[in-house]
Image (spheres, rainbow, N blue to C red):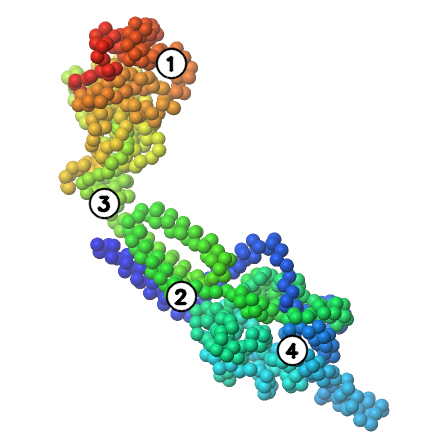
């Protein structure tokens, strides 16, 4: 009872440890990294499986790309005047898109200022009385601001600097939201676009998406905090405006409301994170439609192409360093992260989270089942089941994401699952080790190694009792042993018998038999117990044939000995269901078998004296070995104590050894035919065949017996069997 209770206490301790471990700073980072690695693997496998399936490019969100082609045609990006962007906005807005958003920072004016203005003033004084008019005309800030205002649907982005710099006043159009999120990105030094642009824009937001502890980007920061206010990224602001959201509530998830109506609910992790639902690798025309900035500027795109589409302006050019590392791509354009988020929200295609309470219930159930199962199972079974369930969980977790878009913090279940198994398995191994040492110390001098091994696997079998098993029982007895004892000295007989017992016993063990006991000069062996295995019947017969050969070898060794040259044995093998186990009292018992088949095996061995044969088996053994061993049907008998007749067979040799002995095969088959003729009442035909057998095998006693039986039986009442009254 206390042993079983120990496992439940281990389960409780593991559950508490698994809850507390993530609270430790270093452990938390390690577990978080492991969790993200598992998630990344799921994404990578899914992407690899679906990579060959062409899903098409998503056209509802178009990315106007400041790419290498545009830089080549328009010059170094840092030298681009605002006029380029003004013309771009004018061209795009003419097609009536849903919105235009810039993932480009316009924090500086392109006007001539400061040192450059003073340096150029003398150059322009020769041309005009007011050089400032010319220098102001060279600035296109006003053109861009006018284009933004005229379009009425342009969103601008701002960034956060890690270094002290002039921040100025945050733009009025940068909306502050009254929310208390679990997670937010802390801003240090926000840098807005120049006022001319912010005053004209439809909306403004940040463009900050940072990698996590893994160095990759998995989540989108819904909120950015500055001066105790919560702000949004520009892509989030676009979604809110398109959905008509005027209120945000954050509890378990992030609810977007229009008035009192929830228009969308963004699933959050237990840590308050919103995960991207990636659609594939990033880059031009892999997932989203990319259009070169210069192609738009030079009117290479048909008019009306951008109608009712959402336009994001950003860059995939390597030199502009706006590439991010994601689970699927080490060079993912930053602008596509915002495109992915917008598509996630507008399509409500989210990564969802399994409720933590469900995970807790799963952990409790798993640990409880472990606490019940492991102490009742063998170590190999425990390991096998643990590995099977662990492997089964891999496709389950994968399909949970692929089919339902659900994930969870995998270490929430992985840690208690692994820790629980290891703790309970080690406890089980320690307890079983103590029991095995006790068994070995107590019994290794008294029972066979096989029985010790079986008991060590299941120490509860030490108590008296057993189980039903289908096995083969082999009795081996020495003929005329009493006569040997009368003619030989004690030392001679013990030396000879020890030699014989050693060889015979080793043969039994080699053929996976269990030595039950020595009964005087007899050997009792079990095949298929204590461990059941396929083909134990054949092993019993092969063991009998090997012992028969050992006896022949011994006779050859003692051919000059006046007594031992006549050494002979008889073997009987019966197969069936018996009770095997530790039979006896609580303190003194022996691993053996009891039952009708045990007695019948002994009777079969005794019949060898009557038929002058060596190995006799019953019909159940015959059925199991007839494909590999050559047997002849010997008789149909009723042994002492049995009412029902049973067919018995003599083992001749293996089929392989009999292949080149057609005359012997013919003789034995004639004998069997003669038995059938006797059963049919055809006495004379049977006698003829038996005489033919004796012509081939003059010393075949069974044929002589049957010839004699033909003369003495009452053919009118005979049922085909022979009754034996003695053992």
Q: Residue at x 28, y 7 (%)?
A: 683
Between 526 and 643, the residue placed more toward the observer is 643
Q: Residue at x 53, y 55 (%)?
A: 45
Q: Which of marks 4 and 1 is in front?
A: 4
Instruction: Residue 658: tell me if it is visible.
Output: yes
User: Residue 106 location in percent, x, y?
Assistant: 66, 80
Q: Tell me the distance, in whole angstroms, between the alpha carbons under discs 3 and 1.
A: 50 Å
Q: How crowded is mark 4: few (under 14 residues within 10 Å), some or many (20 or more)?
A: many
- Which of the labelled discs sits on residue 665, or is there none? 1
Q: Residue at x 65, y 78 (%)?
A: 154
Between 453 and 383, the residue placed more toward the observer is 383
Discs 2, 3 touching: Cβ within 8 Å: no
Specify which label sits upstream in the sequence, 2 or 4: 4
In the picture, which quadrant includes the C terminus? Answer: top left
Q: Tell me the distance, in whole angstroms, between the alpha carbons under discs 2 and 4.
A: 41 Å
Q: In which quarter of the image is residue 474?
A: top left
- Which of the labelled discs sits on residue 460, or is there none? 3
Q: Which of marks 3 and 1 is in front?
A: 1
Q: Which of marks 2 and 3 is in front?
A: 2
Residue identifier under label 4: 153
Q: Tell me the distance, in whole angstroms, between the alpha carbons under discs 2 and 3.
A: 41 Å
Position of 574 with respect to 233 (left or right) is left
**Disc 3 on helix, strand or loop?**
helix
Q: Residues within 10 Å of mark 3 (few under 14, many from 20)?
A: few
Q: Nearer the viewer, mark 2 or mark 1?
A: 2
User: Residue 306 location in percent, x, y?
Assistant: 69, 70
Position of 4 with respect to 163 (left or right) is left
Residue identifier under label 2: 356
User: Residue 9 location in percent, x, y?
Assistant: 27, 60
Specify which label sits upstream in the sequence, 3 or 1: 3
Specify which label sits upstream in the sequence, 4 or 1: 4
User: Residue 298 location in percent, x, y?
Assistant: 77, 71
């Amino acid at each position: 009872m206390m042993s079983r209770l120990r496992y439940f206490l281990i389960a409780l301790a593991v559950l508490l440890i698994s809850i507390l471990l993530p609270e430790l700073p270093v452990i938390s980072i390690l577990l978080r990294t492991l969790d993200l690695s598992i998630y990344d693997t799921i994404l990578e496998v899914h992407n690899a499986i679906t990579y060959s399936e062409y899903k098409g490019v998503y056209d509802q969100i178009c990315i106007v790309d400041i790419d290498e082609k545009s830089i080549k045609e328009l010059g170094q990006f840092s030298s681009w005047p605002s006029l380029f962007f003004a013309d771009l906005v004018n061209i795009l807005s003419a097609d009536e898109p849903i919105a235009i958003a810039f993932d480009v920072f316009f924090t500086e004016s392109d006007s001539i200022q400061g040192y450059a203005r003073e340096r150029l003033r003398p150059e322009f004084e020769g041309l005009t009385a007011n050089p400032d008019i010319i220098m102001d005309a060279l600035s296109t800030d006003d053109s861009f601001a006018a284009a933004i205002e005229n379009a009425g649907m342009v969103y601008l982005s701002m960034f956060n600097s890690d270094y002290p710099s002039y921040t100025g006043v945050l733009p009025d159009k940068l909306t502050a939201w009254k929310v208390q999120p679990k997670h937010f990105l802390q801003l240090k030094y926000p840098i807005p676009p120049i006022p001319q642009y912010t005053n004209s824009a439809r909306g403004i937001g940040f463009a900050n998406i940072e990698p996590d502890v893994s160095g990759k980007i998995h989540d989108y920061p819904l909120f950015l905090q500055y001066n105790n206010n919560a702000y949004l990224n520009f892509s989030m602001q676009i979604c809110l405006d398109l959905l008509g959201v005027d209120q945000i509530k954050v509890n378990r998830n992030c609810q977007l409301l229009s008035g009192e109506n929830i228009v969308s609910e963004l699933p959050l992790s237990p840590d308050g994170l919103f995960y991207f639902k990636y659609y594939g690798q990033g880059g031009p025309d892999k997932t989203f439609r990319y259009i070169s900035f210069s192609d738009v500027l030079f009117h290479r795109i048909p008019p009306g192409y951008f109608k009712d589409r959402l336009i994001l302006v950003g860059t995939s050019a390597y030199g502009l360093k706006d590439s991010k590392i994601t689970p699927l791509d080490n060079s993912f354009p930053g602008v596509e992260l915002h495109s992915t988020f917008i598509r996630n929200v507008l399509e409500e295609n989210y990564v969802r989270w399994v409720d933590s309470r469900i995970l807790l219930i799963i952990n409790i159930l798993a640990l409880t089942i472990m606490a019940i199962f492991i102490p009742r199972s063998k170590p190999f079974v425990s390991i096998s089941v643990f590995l099977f369930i662990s492997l089964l969980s891999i496709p389950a977790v994968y399909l949970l994401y692929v089919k339902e878009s659900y994930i969870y913090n995998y270490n929430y279940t992985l840690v208690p699952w692994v820790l629980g198994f290891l703790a309970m398995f080690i406890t089980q191994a320690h307890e079983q080790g103590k029991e095995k040492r006790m068994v070995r110390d107590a019994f290794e001098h008294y029972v066979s190694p096989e029985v010790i091994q079986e008991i060590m696997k299941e120490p509860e079998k030490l108590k008296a009792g057993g189980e039903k098993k289908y096995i083969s029982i082999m009795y081996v007895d020495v003929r005329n042993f009493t006569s040997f004892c009368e003619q030989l000295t004690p030392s001679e007989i013990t030396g000879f018998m020890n030699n014989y017992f050693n060889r015979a016993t080793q043969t039994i063990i080699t053929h996976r038999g269990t030595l039950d006991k020595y009964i005087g000069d007899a050997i009792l062996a079990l095949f298929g117990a204590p461990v059941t295995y396929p083909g134990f019947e054949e092993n019993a017969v092969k063991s009998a044939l090997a012992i028969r050969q050992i006896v022949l070898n011994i006779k050859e060794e003692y051919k000059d000995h006046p007594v031992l040259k006549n050494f002979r044995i008889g073997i009987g093998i019966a197969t069936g269901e018996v009770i095997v186990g530790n039979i006896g009292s609580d303190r003194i018992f022996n691993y053996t078998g009891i039952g009708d088949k045990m007695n019948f095996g002994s009777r079969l061995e005794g019949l060898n004296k009557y038929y002058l044969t060596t190995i006799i088996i019953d019909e159940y053994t015959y059925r199991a070995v007839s494909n590999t061993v050559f047997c002849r049907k010997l008789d149909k008998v009723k042994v002492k104590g049995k009412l029902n007749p049973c067919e018995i067979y003599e083992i001749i040799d293996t089929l392989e050894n009999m292949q080149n002995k057609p005359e012997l095969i013919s003789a034995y088959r004639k004998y069997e035919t003669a038995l059938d003729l006797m059963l049919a009442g055809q006495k004379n035909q049977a006698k003829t065949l038996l005489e033919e057998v004796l012509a081939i095998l003059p010393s075949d006693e069974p044929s002589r017996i049957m010839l004699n039986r033909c003369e003495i039986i009452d053919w009118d009442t005979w049922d085909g069997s022979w009754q034996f009254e003695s053992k």
